[in-house]
Amino acid sequence: MLTKINHIGIAVTSLEEALPFYRDTLGMAFTGIEEVAEQKVRVAMLQVGESKIELLEPLSADSPVAIFIEKHGTGIHHVAYEVADIEAAIARMMADGCRMIDETPRAGAHGTRIAFVHPKSSKGVLTELCQCNH
Ligand code: CO
């Protein structure tokens, strides 16, 4: 069902403050910043081989990422696995009794379709299923 780790999301308070470490010190290829209004975040994408790091900066205090930082501090926010067919993946997980935050796919960054698994079903790790259209 899963084809690879597409990206790991890291919650930060400021992209401008976090980018120099990931882009310049670690030398990741920076591929741009995108605003995902629905999630109230600005997202910076960095390429590492075939996977990505997604830096997430909350745009407001009621952003899910702001609430996460409030609770846990900055750090790893979610792991995103790529799937070929997101509807089939959601259906299979729900059939296995898994609790989904998104029972239908929603729009992610870069034209992807995503669905979050509830961390209660994944031992505390917010887990994203991600279907790319490339
Ligand atoms: Co993500």
Image: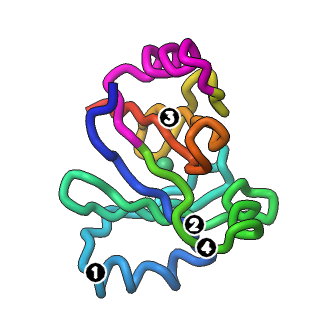
**The label number, if any, that marks residue 11 in the structure image:** 2
Label 4 to label 2: alpha-carbon separation = 5 Å
**The label number, if any, that marks residue 74 in the structure image:** 4
Front residue (pair 122, 40): 122
Q: Is residue 23 above or below residue 106?
A: below
First in sequence: mark 3 or mark 2? 2
First in sequence: mark 1 or mark 3? 1
Which quarter of the image is occupied by the C terminus? Answer: top left
First in sequence: mark 1 or mark 4? 1
Which quarter of the image is occupied by the N terminus? Answer: top left
Residue linked to disc 3: 114
The mark closer to the camera, 3 or 4, is 4
Please name the amino acid that badge 4 sits on.
Answer: Thr
Front residue (pair 15, 123): 123
Which residue corresponds to the image point at 47% horizontal and 46% vertical from the top-left?
A: 109
Label 1 to label 2: alpha-carbon separation = 17 Å
Secondary structure of residue under mark 4: loop
Give the magenta part as a residue range: 81-98
Please name the amino acid that badge 2 sits on.
Answer: Ala
**The label number, if any, that marks residue 26 in the structure image:** 1
Label 3 to label 4: alpha-carbon separation = 22 Å
Q: Are marks 4 and 2 in contact (CB under 8 Å)?
A: yes
